[in-house]
Image (spheres, grey):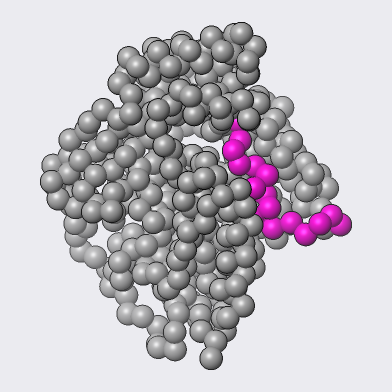
C-alpha cells in the first residue's frame, strides 16, 4: 500500500513563530523573515557522494515520490512532501538528503502542515521556553590567524603571477560546550537577528545564509549573487559612507563581477532569456554589507528537460565560493586551506514534489558534532589581486560573528 502524505491548512497565523512549534525532534528548517518551512522527525534520509551526487539525489527523490499517495488540499510551492538537501562543497564528501515526517510551512500569513501516515493531523503546541546549552569556549581551527593571513598572501601572489583570477579561502573555529548545544536555540537566535537571511538546518548543519544559489518557481529561475564585503560599524552615518565606498571599490567590484559572470554563464544554456543587472546593489545585514546582484531567467522548455537539480549541478561551485577559473581555484583551495569544508559552501535548501524549490549556499554556518557538544564554524573571503591579508582576516571575523554570537547567546 502506498505511503500517504497529507497537506492541510493550519489557518491564518500571521504571528506564528515556526521555531517555537513543538513536535518531534526538529530535523530541518528553511526560514526567512518568519516565513518558510520547518521539519520534524525523519521519514526517510540518505547520503550521496561523488561526481553524480546531484543526479543521484534527483533519482532517490523521484523513487520516494513514486511510492507515495499525496493528498494536497493546499497546493502552492512548498506544500506536499518536502526534500531537504545539504550538499557537500567537494564531490567526494558526504551530502545529506532528508524527508521529514512532519513539515509546517508558512507564507504571507497562510500556514499549512504536511504529515506522513494514515493518522489524524498531529497535535502541535507552542514551546514556552527554548532550552539553552552550557558554557561555550572557542578553539583555533585548522589554521591560526597568522597562518591564515600567510595563506592569503600566497594566494594573492598566485593571482598576481597569472595562475588564476580569484580564489575563495575559508577558515574555521571550533566551539565546545560542556552540555549539548541546542539546535532550536541557535535557529531561534539566527531568525531573530538575521531576518533577511535564509536560516537553515539539515542533518546538523545550521546557518543563516544571505546567498540564494537558485530559486525555481514554475519556469522562473533566480540566483542572488554576493561578493564584496565590508564590516558595519553600527553608526548609521558611517555605515552609509561605507556602503558608498563599497559600491565604488575596484577590488570589490572586480570580485563581484567574477561571481556574477559565473552564475550568468551557468544559467544561459537553460534559459530563453536572462536578466543581469549592470550595477550591483548594497545588501545591508546585521553585521556586514555585501555587493549583491539578482540574476533572473526563464527556463527554455524547448531544450532538454531542466529541473532544480540540473541547475544546481551547473551553478555549483560558483565563483562566489570557489573562484575563477574553477579548476585552478579548487586546486588552490586544497593546497592552502588545510581543512575539509564538508557541507560548508555547498548547496542547501529544499525541493517540493512538483520540482519547485529554494537552494542557498551554506554560508555563515556551523556543523554540529554527533554528540552535539561541539561545532565547527566557517567563514570565507574572496581573494583577488588587490586583497590585503589583514583586511581579509577582519572580514572573516565579521562573517564568523553570526554563528559565534548564536552559540554564545544560546548557552
| Coordinates of residue 140 in the picture (x, y in percent) | 26, 28
241 horizontally vs 133: left or right: right
Magenta stretch, residue numbers: 302-319
Q: Quadrant of residue 324?
A: top right
| Coordinates of residue 268 in the picture (x, y in percent) | 77, 41
Relative to 72, say whether 179 is above or below.
above
Q: Residue at x 64, y 68 (%)?
A: 354
Residue 280 seen in the current view = no
Q: Residue at x 43, y 34 (%)?
A: 285
Give the quadrant of the C terminus. Answer: top left
| Coordinates of residue 104 in the picture (x, y in percent) | 43, 68
User: Residue 317 magenta-drawn?
Assistant: yes
5 horizontally vs 316: left or right: left
| Coordinates of residue 141 in the picture (x, y in percent) | 30, 30
Residue 127 seen in the current view = yes
283 horizontally vs 191: left or right: right
108 horizontally vs 215: left or right: left
Between 262 and 238, the one lying in front of the other is 262
User: Residue 356 magenta-drawn?
Assistant: no
Q: Residue at x 61, y 35 (%)?
A: 318
Between 13 and 134, the one lying in front of the other is 134
Q: Quadrant of residue 233?
A: top left
Q: Residue at x 67, y 49 (%)?
A: 311
Q: Quadrant of residue 263?
A: top right
Relative to 247, say whether 138 is above or below.
below
Amino acid at each position: 500500500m502506498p505511503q500517504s502524505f497529507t497537506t492541510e491548512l493550519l489557518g491564518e497565523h500571521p504571528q506564528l513563530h515556526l521555531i517555537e512549534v513543538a513536535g518531534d525532534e526538529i530535523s530541518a528548517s528553511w526560514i526567512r523573515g518568519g516565513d518558510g518551512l520547518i521539519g520534524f522527525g525523519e521519514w526517510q534520509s540518505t547520503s550521496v557522494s561523488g561526481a553524480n551526487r546531484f543526479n543521484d539525489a534527483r533519482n532517490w527523490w523521484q523513487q520516494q515520490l513514486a511510492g507515495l499517495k499525496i493528498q494536497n488540499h493546499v497546493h502552492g510551492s512548498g506544500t506536499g512532501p518536502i526534500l531537504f538537501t545539504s550538499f557537500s562543497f567537494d564531490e567526494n564528501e558526504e551530502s545529506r538528503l532528508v524527508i521529514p515526517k512532519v513539515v509546517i510551512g508558512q507564507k504571507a500569513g497562510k500556514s499549512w502542515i504536511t504529515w506522513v501516515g494514515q493518522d489524524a493531523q498531529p497535535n502541535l503546541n507552542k514551546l514556552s521556553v527554548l532550552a539553552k546549552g552550557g558554557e561555550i569556549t572557542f578553539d583555533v581551527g585548522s589554521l591560526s590567524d597568522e597562518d591564515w593571513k600567510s595563506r592569503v598572501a600566497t594566494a594573492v601572489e598566485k593571482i598576481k603571477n597569472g595562475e588564476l583570477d580569484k580564489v575563495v579561502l575559508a577558515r574555521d573555529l571550533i566551539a565546545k560546550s560542556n552540555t549539548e548545544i541546542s539546535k532550536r536555540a541557535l535557529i531561534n537566535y539566527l531568525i531573530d537577528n538575521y531576518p533577511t537571511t535564509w536560516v537553515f538546518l539539515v542533518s546538523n548543519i545550521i546557518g543563516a545564509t544571505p546567498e540564494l544559489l537558485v530559486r525555481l518557481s514554475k519556469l522562473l529561475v533566480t540566483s542572488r549573487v554576493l561578493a564584496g564585503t565590508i564590516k558595519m560599524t553600527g553608526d548609521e552615518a558611517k555605515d552609509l559612507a561605507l556602503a558608498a565606498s563599497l559600491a565604488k571599490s575596484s577590488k570589490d567590484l572586480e570580485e563581484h563581477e567574477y561571481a556574477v559572470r559565473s552564475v550568468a554563464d551557468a544559467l544561459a544554456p537553460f534559459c530563453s532569456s536572462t536578466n543581469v543587472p549592470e550595477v550591483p546593489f548594497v545588501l545591508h545585514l546585521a553585521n556586514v554589507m555585501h555587493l549583491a546582484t539578482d540574476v533572473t531567467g526563464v527556463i527554455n522548455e524547448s531544450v532538454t528537460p531542466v529541473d532544480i537539480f540540473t541547475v544546481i549541478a551547473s551553478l555549483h561551485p560558483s565563483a562566489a565560493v570557489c573562484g575563477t577559473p574553477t579548476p585552478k581555484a579548487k586546486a588552490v583551495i586544497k593546497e592552502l586551506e588545510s581543512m575539509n569544508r564538508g557541507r560548508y559552501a555547498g548547496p542547501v535548501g529544499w525541493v517540493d514534489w512538483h520540482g519547485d524549490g529554494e537552494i542557498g549556499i551554506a554560508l555563515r554556518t556551523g556543523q554540529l558534532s554527533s554528540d552535539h557538544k561541539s561545532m565547527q564554524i566557517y567563514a570565507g573571503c574572496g581573494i583577488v589581486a588587490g586583497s590585503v591579508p589583514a583586511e581579509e582576516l577582519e572580514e572573516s571575523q565579521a562573517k564568523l560573528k553570526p554563528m559565534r554570537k548564536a552559540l554564545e547567546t544560546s548557552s
